[in-house]
Amino acid sequence: MLKLLTHPLKPRAAVALACVAAVVGLLSISSVALQLVGIWRTDDLKSMGLVVPFVCAALILRAWRQIGWRADGSWWGFVLLAGSAALVYLRDQTLLIVTVNKDWLLQIPPLPLVAVVYAAGIVLLFGGKQLLKAAWFPVLLMWAVIPVPQTFSRRVDLPLQHASAIVARAFAHALGQPLTQDRLRLMFTPQFGMFIAPGCNGIRGAITLGLAAIVVGYIYRFRWYVFAPVIAGAVLLGYLFNFLRLCLLVIYYKLALPYPWMQHHAKVADYLIGGCLFLCALAIFFWTANKLRREPDDVQSLPAQQPSAGNVSAGPYLARVGAVVTLAAIFGAEAMHSYYVAPRPANPIAALPQQIGNYTLTRTWNDTLIDGIVVYTWGEYANPADSSAPHVSLGISPQMGVHDVEVCHIARGDDPTWHGQMQTTTIGGAVDLTLATYNDGRSQKLEASTVCDAGACRQYSESGSHVTLVYAHPHRTLPLGADTTRPVPILLKVDGGDPTEAVSSAEPKLAAALQQFLAGANLVQLTTPYSRP
């Protein structure tokens, strides 16, 4: 062992060890990594963030090679890693959400910030200040693990959805094709048509081209007055080709009217048209970038390639690797223990009542995790006396501990368009609810959450006139005999709101429907079967 510590490491071996340590070190921020994976898998708009860590890693290795694989690491990098791990651990145990003016929501610390700090810590720990200076761009690019914030999606994505529908509708009218009056649906026949969803507005292609332009501009070393127009042009190119795709899709739908077999393959045609046009957009972009690259005035001079560094002293370097592994073991063991050893109540799923006030149960289902844990058992209720009344879905969490619903939405990249508080009367007494509205472009819905514990249902938020703090502490099982009850989260959803209606007028209508439903409910009684651990 002593011989191994005194034997020098070759630069490439040192780099390989640093890469392994960076991967293992992710266990210290495992909850953040899992949340990012969940966002990438469930949110098409943010799925592009999946490739960002790999691109950043490649660019960091490229910068490391340019400085001759010098490994003059600093222990200040470990301070950053330990700080980020502790902050993430605190974030998981004490959820803190800040909202400003009821329409901007932020969980502290933000996921992209954790990614940037982790990348900076790894670079500083193994490569030192010289590598951090050379790789500042890919380190900061880690912020793009979530390419666009949800506020951008709400204020830009949804308006573009309507703009795309207007373009497609205008082109269809120009071809002489009559359509229905729905703003977002283009129905060529009662059964054949298209819905202009948010994903159809070109924003994904624009984001992809924009990120590609940022990376290409950095690699080609464009000067700032070329860098900025290249990125703007790439984004506009994505939108331009999306409008072209919609027009071509309208032509396909018109041609498919007399041919049922073509109608059955409309989705495949959409993918083929979009894929071919995106490849054309990429070809145009790279042709333009390569042409600009040939202009000496548009490109910064390349830095001098430094000679390869000598061997690295094994002892101090392996100590830094061991420190990262130890940090991962400490915080990763906690995460694994919480996942595999956390108590899972064996309470059977109780049947939901067939009638709650004037509302009748229409269907039931369960939301489960991969390992079979039931997150919510759901029942959808409708008012048979009023067919126009929105349906209300009641969800009870029979096995999960206390968690804040807005945090779950944040993990998926969803921010509320509005949120507030409400106290309403039920058969079981007054309940306090935290409300939030969400708009996905197809419908507007209201969600209300509360936690029933010790015979009462109370919320966990404090709201001021401009700033709201949402604080939730996960419920942990105490030693045997110390805790005889458990809090049971409840989530209610009211669907059916018009996505084009202002939230200031839609929210009171949805809230009134919720109050009417809860007037005949007894939430404490409904959660009693699950209150015993």
Image (tube, helix red, strand yellow):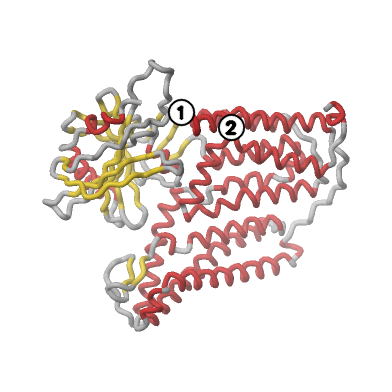
Q: What element carries label 1?
A: loop
Q: Which residue is drawn at 16% across and 45% down?
A: 359
Reading the image, the residue beneath label 1 is 94
Q: Write down the quadrant of residue 16 in the picture.
A: top right
Residue at mark 2 to residue at mark 1: CA–CA distance: 18 Å
Q: Looking at the image, can residue 9 be seen?
A: yes
- Whichever of callouts 2 and 1 sits on the residue coming sooner in the sequence is 1
> Could you tell me the amino acid type at mark 1?
Thr
Rate crowding at label 1 as few (under 14), some (14 to 19) or many (20 or more) other CA atoms within 10 Å.
few
In the figure, is residue 498 to the left or right of 132? left
- Residue 394 rendering spot, x and y as whole percentages: 27, 42
In the figure, is residue 435 to the left or right of 157? left
Q: Residue at x 75, y 36 (%)?
A: 128
Q: Residue at x 45, y 76 (%)?
A: 248
**Toward the viewer: 323 or 139?**
323
**Toward the viewer: 518 or 143?**
518
The disc placed on residue 327 is none
- Disc nearest the viewer among 2 and 1: 2
- Residue 388 rendering spot, x and y as whole percentages: 17, 55
- Residue 393 rendering spot, x and y as whole percentages: 26, 45
**Toward the viewer: 264 or 289?**
264
Q: Residue at x 41, y 39 (%)?
A: 373
> Vertical placement of 248 versus 507: above or below?
below
> Could you tell me the amino acid type at mark 2?
Gly
Q: Looking at the image, can residue 129 be seen?
A: no
Reading the image, the residue beneath label 2 is 332
Task: Name the image quarter holding the N terminus.
Answer: top right
Rate crowding at label 2 as few (under 14), some (14 to 19) or many (20 or more) other CA atoms within 10 Å.
many
Q: Is mark 2 on a helix, strand or loop?
A: helix
